[in-house]
Amino acid sequence: MNILPLPASPSAVSAEWMTAVLHKNGSLPETSSVSHVEHTPIGEGVGMLSEIEFLGLTYAGDHDGAPASVVVKFPTSNEVNRGVAEQFKVYDREVGYFSDLDAQSLAAGPKVYLAEMETPTHFAIVLEDLSAYRTGDQVTGATLPEAEAAIDELAKMHASFWNKLEDGHAAWLPRAANSDNATNMAGGSAAGWDATVSTFGEHIPQHLRDAKDAYVAAIPRLQEHLDQAPRTLVHGDFRMDNLFFAEHPDHHPMTFVDWQGPMLGKGMFDVSYFLGQSTQVDVRRAHEQQLIERYVTGLSNAGVTDYDFATAWQDYRVGLLYIWVWATVIAGTLDAENERGNAWMVEMIKRNVAAIDDLDLLELL
């Protein structure tokens, strides 16, 4: 049995194909097999660029150590969102991360059973089922304990790659500036701005709308700032729906998934993105300096010696302003498809607007 060709979608995953996957990575003895696969789609509005399912696995023969269930991830069938995914090469980047970098990270992550790219537009990923953890809620937003756990894991992950990806390793990884990804993000923000205002305008104040031309013109300079050394691996989509929090004593405090947007740049991008778009506004307002200090301390504890709070705070302010690019690309170009997808876009915009105003970030323009 061979893992190629890949199934067309999660619903097409068969017992025979899962047997081949588990044989290839050594999780199942060659004398045993998967006899039945039970499919359960992930809740709508969680994944925008992929189709994801839980698979319950029944075995024939010895299966000690084999997973009782896994999560599978394939390209989305939504043509609009798939076009965006292909433009930003998110499928290549996720498979690249799991193939090249995952094993080097100090941060907690799911076991990877398969990460395979068959064509530039078709991939399959099979991961450990994290459903025993509590999934973060993008609409509700992070509480302080959730934010603290998330910051701790970000510090571990960023420290793992701090100044270590400068030699051309992982050449598929785009830079925060002067890359096709950076150009696409800038163009996507300019193209998506008016649609974002049209759909979500009640949450966007006039002074931010009026800043469109100045903001779009400043995007390359914001990208240049976030591309300055020290650089590390940036997750790129570190938001609540991609985070999993401990429910049992043997769990990691928090782990995370979804590596479709990684890049090389300042780690503070991920911190800004998480605090500015995924954390409850009152929590960010009351604790953001404490959380930035926690991040810097976490880096230091992991061996990073060239990053202090003053630098981190300036990078944080730039990051909070720059992530408005993500808001306009996501809300202005993706098809939310359902009520929950629309709801988390609303919260993303409201939180980012609040951060821009709270810290007077338009002055940076």
Image: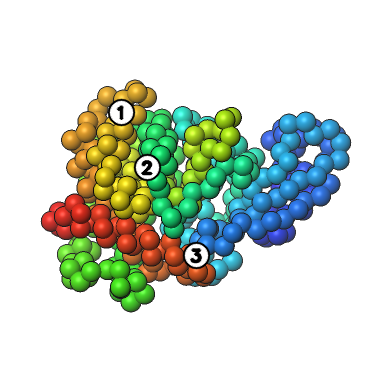
Separation (CA) of disc 3 from disc 1: 36 Å
The amino acid sitting under disc 2 is Leu
Residue drawn at x 32%, y 34% is 295
Tag 3's secondary structure? helix
Residue drawn at x 49%, y 49% is 136
Tag 2's secondary structure? helix
Q: Badges 3 and 1: C-beta atoms under 8 Å apart?
A: no
Figure check: 243 above or below 87: above
- Residue 339 at what x, y percent from top left? 50, 69
Residue drawn at x 81%, y 50% is 36
**Labels 2, 1: front one:** 2
Instruction: Judge whether residue 263 can be spotted in this image.
Output: no
Mark 2 vs mark 3: which is more N-terminal? 2
Mark 1 Cα shell of 10 Å, populated few (<14), some (14-19), many (≥20): some
Residue drawn at x 30%, y 47% is 284
Depth check: 312 or 168 in front?
A: 312
Q: Which residue is mark 2?
A: 144
Q: Which residue is mark 3?
A: 340
Mark 3 vs mark 1: which is more N-terminal? 1
Q: How is the image coloured?
A: rainbow
- Residue 303 at what x, y percent from top left? 34, 22
| Residue 160 sits in quarter | top left
Depth check: 179 or 343 in front?
A: 343
Mark 3 Cα shell of 10 Å, populated few (<14), some (14-19), many (≥20): some
The amino acid sitting under disc 3 is Arg
- Residue 51 at what x, y percent from top left? 59, 59
Relative side of 53 to 163, left or right: right
Q: Which residue is mark 1?
A: 297
The amino acid sitting under disc 1 is Thr
Quick one: quadrant of the N terminus? top right
